Image (cartoon, grey):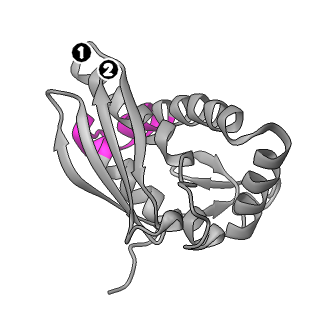
Amino acid sequence: MAAPEVPIEVDPQTGIWTTNGLPMMYLPRHFMVNMQQTIEAAMGVAAYRAILYKSCHLSALQWCRAEAKTHGLGPEETFRHYLRRMSQRGHGQVEIAALDVTAGQAEIVVRNSAYALGYGPGAGRRVCYVFEGSFAGGMAYVLEAEGRPGEPACQEIACFAEGAPECRFEVRCG
């Protein structure tokens, strides 16, 4: 089965790549994994994880707002579109295992995570925490667009890099 196309436009004057009007950067997977490993070594996993969570949460929220407006998508459609785009952009095969929009909860599976594959199954720890803020931010958009209160939080509960068959995440409203 062929993967759906992701439209990439390159401005001949500036060299800026865009998809659906959003400026993009195209980077090799090893660049992102090497950057994560180097930052972890410099500042520690906990500190880097906290920074990533906050920045990825905000980025997901901004992306979902822009895409919903661009494509006229409803809140749940936007969240599903966001996860599909993550898959199409090489993060891994991102799928919703369970979704309860009313409760602001989701279970998300990532197979072939770029990070877990980069670290390898022998890393002995969860390394895909980069997705936590993104998934929480996507769900935050859903709640915001539905006019519902709550701040979703996400936690990686299993990772291929620690020996699990896939990476799994829980999103819960607190």
Q: Identify the image quadrant of the N terminus.
A: bottom left
Circle number at residue 144 = 2
Q: Is residue 27 left or right of residue 136?
A: right
Q: Is residue 16 visible?
A: no
User: Any mark on residue 147, and which?
Assistant: 1
Residue 91 sits above or below residue 128 on the image = below
Q: Is residue 66 one of those drawn in magenta?
A: yes
The image quarter in which residue 138 lies: top left
- Crowding near pointer 1: few (<14 within 10 Å), some, many (20+)? few
Between 19 and 25, the one lying in front of the other is 25
Whole-percent x, y for residue 92 in the image:
47, 66
Give the residue type at disc 1.
Answer: Gly
Say which residue appears at 39% left-offset and 67% top-offset. Answer: 166
In the shown orientation, is residue 2 left or right of residue 98? right
Q: Is residue 116 visible?
A: yes
| Callout 2 amino acid | Glu
* Place of residue 74 in the rendered image (x, y in percent of width and height, measured from the top left): 23, 36
x then y, percent, for residue 113:
50, 66
Residue furthest to the front: 124
Check contact, mark 2 vs mark 1: CB within 8 A: yes
Please give the range of residues in magenta. Answer: 63-79
Quadrant of the image occupied by residue 53: top right
